[in-house]
Image (cartoon, helix red, strand yellow):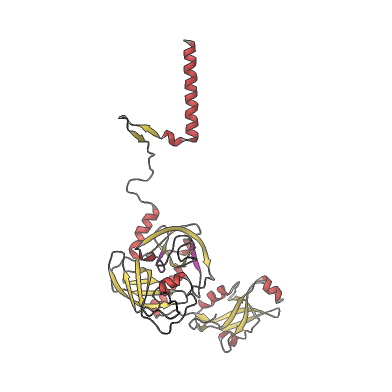
Amino acid sequence: MRAIWLLFSQAVTVAVALLFVLATFKPVWLERTWGMNGERATARVPSDRPVGMHSPLSMAARAAAPAIVSISARAAPTSPPTRSPHASEPWFRFFFGERTPGGSPDPSPREGLGSGVIVDPEGLVLTNHHVVAGAADIQVLLADGRETTATVVGADPETDLAVLRIPLRGLQAIILGRMDQLQVGDPVLAIGNPFNVGQTVTAGIVSAFGRSGLGVSTFENFIQTDAAINPGNSGGALVDDQGHLVGINTAIYSRSGGSMGIGFAIPVDLAKQVMQELVAKGQVTRGWIGVQPRDLDPDFAKTLQLPVTQGVLITGVLQGGPAGQAGMRPGDVLVGIEGHSLSSTAELLARVSRLAPESVIQAQVVRAGERVDLKIRIGQRPASGAP
C-alpha cells in the first residue's frame, strides 16, 4: 500500500511540474479545452471593450469622412506646354499626364485626380493648388455619392493651396484642429481617394514637424507622417484622433510613385490663414524686402572670415527695392528682424512674408564686423518673388 501511495505522489508531482512548464512556456496549449459533447472548444479571454464600442481611431475616421471629397480636374491641352520643374516626379506625372515619346505635348485633355476637404457648410472646399491648376472643369464627388461642379475661389501656388466652392448648402464640414496640441508620435489618419479607388483611410503617426526644402512650394513647413499617402490623396485630410483637421496631404517622398512611409501635409494653421485671405481677397498678400539670401553655416562663415556664424548672408539686393532703399548691401549678414534672430533663409522668408506691406520694421545686420540697424519699409511680395 505504501508503494502505491508513493507512486501516486510521484505522478502528481510530475503532473504539477508539467503544468507549470506548460503555463510558463506554452500557455496557449492550456487555453484549449474539450466540450461536454466531445467537441473541441477554445477558451475566450473576455474583452475590455463593451459590445458596440469602437476604437478612437475608427470614431475619428467616422467623424471626418463625410467632409472628405474626391476631385476630378479636367484641363484643356495647351500649346506649347510650359514644363514644370517637377515634371520628372511620379506624383506630377500622375496628376498632369505624360508626354509622348517624341517629346511633343499630349494633344488630349488632361485629367487630374485628387481630394479635398469641406471646411464650411456653405460649400467651401480646401485642396491643393496642383490638383486643380489649369483646370477648365472641376468635378467634386461627395462621400454620400452626390456629384457637382466646383469653381475656384482663389489659389496660392506658393503654399500649394486652393479654395473651391460647390453649389450645395448644409454640408457637414470638418472641425479644424490645433497645431499647438499636436506632438510627434501622436496618431493621425490620412483620408482621401488614392488611385481613384474610392475614399480610403490610412493610419500612422506624426513623424516630424517643420520639414522644408522639398521643392514642392515656396513656403514649406510640412508635417511629416508615415500614414500612407498616394497619388489621389493630395488635397485630402490629415486628421488627429478626434477627427479634427490638422493638415492637408500634399506630397510624398517616393522613388516609385507609391507610398514609402514618408508623407507631407500642410499644417492646418497655415492652411486656415491662406484660406481666409483667398476667400476675402482672392489672393494672399505677403511682405517683401527684395534681397537674395543664402544660408550661413559655420564652415561658410569661416571661409569668408565673417565675424558671425548665425544669420543669413545677403548675396544680392534689388536696386530700388525696400532693402536697397534702406541701405542694405551685398555681403551684409542679416541676423535679426524686429529683435527676432534668424538662422536660415526659410526663416527669413517666413518672417518677412508675414509682415504687412507699408509697415516699417527694424532689421539688424552685421557689416565689416560692426552691427548696423536698418529701418525697412516693407513692400508687397510679387508672384514667385524673392524675399
Which quadrant of the view contains residue 165?
A: bottom left
Above or below, comparing residue 201 to residue 82 in the picture: above
Q: Residue at x 49, y 24 (%)?
A: 14
Q: Is residue 70 magenta?
A: no
Query: Mostly what secondary structure, the magenta segment?
Result: loop
Which quadrant of the view contains residue 33?
A: top left
Q: Is residue 169 visible?
A: no
The percent position of residue 146, horizontal first and vertical second, equals: 27, 68
Above or below, comparing residue 21 to residue 251 in the picture: above
Q: Residue at x 29, y 74 (%)?
A: 167
Q: Is residue 332 left or right of residue 129?
A: right
Tally the numbered discs.
Answer: 0
Give the extent of the magenta segment: 219-237
Q: Quadrant of the C terminus?
A: bottom right
The percent position of residue 384, horizontal first and vertical second, equals: 50, 81
Q: Is residue 224 magenta?
A: yes
The percent position of residue 50, horizontal first and vertical second, equals: 35, 45
**Which residue is the extreme one toward the top?**
1
Above or below, comparing residue 130 to residue 358 in the picture: above
Of the pair 300 and 2, the residue shown nearer to us:
2
Of the pair 12 and 283, the residue shown nearer to us:
12
The percent position of residue 25, horizontal first and vertical second, equals: 50, 35
Of the pair 278 and 144, the residue shown nearer to us:
144
**Which residue is the extreme one toward the front?**
102
Q: Is residue 313 visible?
A: yes
